[in-house]
Amino acid sequence: MSDKTLGKGAVLEELLRAYFLRAGFFVMRGVPFRFAEEDLTDVDLWLYERPTGSARRVQICDIKYKQRPKAVERIFWTSGLATALKVDGAYVATTDKRTNLRAIAENLDLQLIDGNDIQRILASHSVLYPQRITDEQLTASLRSVDDDLRGKYFQNSRDQILSSLSDGFGARSAVKALESFSRLATSAISYRPNSPAAIASGRLAYLAGAIVCESLDFVSVDAAFRPLDERRDLMLQAVRYGALASDQGQRSLRLALALIEKYSPAGKASALAVEQGLKQDLESIPAEIIADQAMKLLKTDQLFLVGKDLEMESYSLDVASFDYLSNASKAMLGALLDYSGIDRKRFATAWISSPPPSDAEPHDRSVPEKKQTELFRNDQSK
């Protein structure tokens, strides 16, 4: 997909995603927000930040590129969306340059990226990543593979991975992303090596693995000042119990067991049998594999960075095969494969990428820099 066919709004989203990535954020674009099984809207940019070793912050960014973007309406709309998602803060990015917008945003505890800010970002020639594909290119490639296979497996898989963030970031998203990783890594070794389907599976497996890392990093902050064994236990619970590890999850479980006890013919015996069966199934999950590796990375402050690394690779033009990942990323990915019962060697040979140039900037991926200022050169009439 060429720059010319990419809409200006999409180009701005890609530019700001690259801007936040370079600022140290973990960034996802186009995260679906669902409520009661209904798709309500997409979050333009979902941002996860690790400002200190003991602090984490989740924010969103709403982006509009139009001559009359109705910035005031978007500011109020974004404030409501941030409340609904229960995030820590939000940005509004608009091409509007009116000076009074910043005061309105500040009154709602939002941060504004206005037309002047966007022009300054555009003036920099080092924001976008050469060799990194856009979300539109990723979606088009997944659609092409799905068309060949006469289905929508890969497109639906991408949506499921992204929606795990808005469904509940932390233990819940970790478990959902783990399920996606296991399914996609299995797909990667099932297709013909180096086939488009094998590469698409690996690309999405990296994306799911990235969310597993960031979800566990977010979980870890609850035990930032506790002994290591307590932090490990927190990781184990997150992987093994997912949403059930939270207070709300425990309340839901107790309610379900109470209903079984009240309405089933065997009463309390049925509820006890269900509870014991569920506990046995959960205890059989090999959560130690992931918890132990996550703890190793947390000790050296690398878990968050591995998540960023895997996200970068998932959007690489030439997505790196297992052997070309960083050592820390290979270690975490190996743990994810072991957890999923997938042979590491088979996954490593599912596709073979070209070795990275010895003098390449790490993760130097996306649109050539010389194109950047041309992307917004036209007027804002669209």
Image: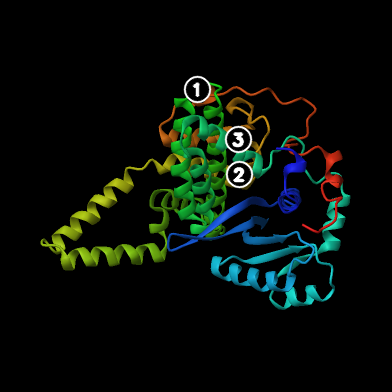
Is residue 203 shown to the viewer in this render?
no
User: Which element is circle 1 on?
Assistant: helix
Identify residue type, mark 1. Answer: Lys
- Say which of 337 and 378 sits in front: 378
C-alpha gap between disc 1 and disc 2: 22 Å
C-alpha gap between disc 2 and disc 3: 23 Å
Residue 10's place in the image compared with 41, above or below, is above
Quarter of the picture holding the C terminus: bottom right
Considering only order in the chain, which callout, 3 or 1, is on the residue closer to the N terminus? Answer: 3
Quarter of the picture holding the N terminus: top right
Identify residue type, mark 2. Answer: Gly
Residue 199's place in the image compared with 369, above or below, is above
Is residue 174 shown to the viewer in this render?
yes
Question: How far from the left and from the top, in percent, is residue 300?
Answer: 63, 44
Q: Quadrant of residue 256?
A: bottom left
Determine which of the numbered discs, if any, sits on residue 141 in the image.
3
- Say which of 193 and 322 sits in front: 193
Q: Quadrant of residue 316?
A: top right
Identify residue type, mark 3. Answer: Ser
Question: Which residue in the protein does label 1 denote?
Answer: 345
Q: Residue furthest front?
A: 381
Considering only order in the chain, which callout, 3 or 2, is on the residue closer to the N terminus? Answer: 3
User: Which element is circle 3 on?
Assistant: helix
Question: How far from the left and from the top, in percent, is residue 322?
Answer: 58, 28
Question: How far from the left and from the top, in percent, is residue 296?
Answer: 55, 42
Question: Which residue in the protein does label 2 denote?
Answer: 307
Q: How many numbered discs, if any?
A: 3
Question: How far from the left and from the top, in percent, is residue 231?
Answer: 50, 53
**Relative to 98, is 150 on the left or the right?**
left
